[in-house]
Each structure stands twice: as structure tokens, then as C-alpha cells.
Image (spheres, rainbow, N blue to C red):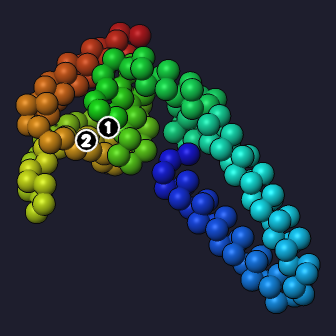
Amino acid sequence: MDKKQISQYSLLLIITVGALIKMAWHNINGKDLGVFIIILCIFAAAAAIFYAVRLATGTSSICKKLGLNNKSELAAWKNSCRIRYEGNIYVNDDYTLFMENGAVWRTTDIMEMRDYTRKRRSTGFNYNIDFTHVNGNHAHVVMNDKFMRDRLHAEMEQFLADVKQIYRSR
């Protein structure tokens, strides 16, 4: 699960528990309310433990797209990638993973790369690489250093040329 899903599930759990307490407050008299709150706390603790275990060993949509079973396999896949940049992009011979938007593309489906620079009000300049998929979708990698962008771009061009040559020769 990514951070967005974690916050959504946490918010859903808080709203559900709050709604149950409100219903109990109106329907149960004072002496039974304490017992109900204790049972509700035990249920919430059990749900939190289940959720923590699920979070640690579960799968995410990225795992499913890559054909992996759990997050530990995803971590091993990320470490095995030939090109990786600060948690933003992971590339191997078969797949390219863009962490900015969670996109997973076949490496051979990357049609072109384009460098661009954007001026931001608070952080100065961002140096980006925009990737174009064969179906027209875009993904980008945001960097704060122009030299790192140029180095990654050159590395990616060479890697993509090698991968496409291997697939053409098959």
C-alpha cells in the first residue's frame, strides 16, 4: 500500500469507530456504555494489528503490475534494477517503474525522453525528464540537479538502445 491508501483506510477506520460510538451513546444507557467502549477498543486494536500485518506482508498495485507476490519481492526487484534514481525511477530489461505516479511500463515501450526545466516559486528550479509511452501516456522524473538529470538521460538513452537492440535480434 502506498501512503495515499494508508491515509484513506485510516480515515475510514476513524470515521467508522466515531459513528459506532455516537450510535452507542444514543442507544445504550450509562452502565452498558463502558462495556461497549471496552469491546470497541479491543476490536479496534485487533483491526490495527491485522492492518499492520497486512501492510508489512501485503501486496500493492505496483506488485501486481510487476507480477510480484509481496513487498519484500518488490524491494528485491528494485535492488536488482540496473538503473535507479533516488526512489523516482527503477529500470531493468523488462519493466520501468515510475514511483511519482505508480506507472509500470515495458522498457521497450518507452518511445522518447525529453528534458525540461521548470521554475518553481519556493524551491527554485526543477530539472525533469519526460518519458513518452508508445500509447501517448507521459511520466516524468523530477530532479533538483541539472547534472544528475543529464547523466541519467544519457544513461537511459544508452540502456534503452541496448534493450531495444536485444529485442530486435530475437
Q: Are dots 2 and 1 in contact, CB under 8 Å?
A: yes
Q: Which residue is drawn at 75% across and 83% down?
A: 22
**SS of the residue under disc 2:** strand
Q: Quadrant of residue 115?
A: top left
Lateral position of residue 86 relative to residue 99, left or right: left
Q: Which quadrant of the view contains residue 106?
A: top left
The type of residue carrying mark 1 is: Asn
Q: Residue 88 carries which label?
A: 1
Q: Can residue 168 be seen in this view?
A: no
Task: Pick the residue in front: 6 or 155.
Answer: 6
Of 22 and 8, which appears nearest the observer? 22
Label 1: few (<14), some (14–19) or many (≥20) C-alpha neighbours in 10 Å: some
Q: In this view, does 149 lie to the left or right of 42?
A: left
| Whether residue 15 is situated above or below residue 55 in the rendered picture | below
Residue holding disc 2: 141
Q: Which residue is drawn at 61% across and 31% down?
A: 70
In this rendered view, identify the residue nearer to me: 160 or 150: 150
* Amino acid type, callout 2: Val
Q: In this view, does 69 lie to the left or right of 133?
A: right
Gap between marks 2 and 1, in whole Å?
A: 6 Å
Asked if 41 appears above or below 64 in the picture, the reply is below
Place of residue 150 in the rendered image (x, y in percent of width and height, measured from the top left): 10, 30
Q: Identify the residue at horizontal 69%, vertical 40% (top origin).
A: 53
Residue 134 screen position, x and y as percent: 33, 40
Residue 113 position in % (x across, y down): 20, 37
Tell me if 104 is positioned left or right of 166 in this view. Answer: right
Q: Residues within 10 Å of mark 2 (few under 14, many from 20)?
A: many
Q: Quadrant of the N terminus?
A: top right
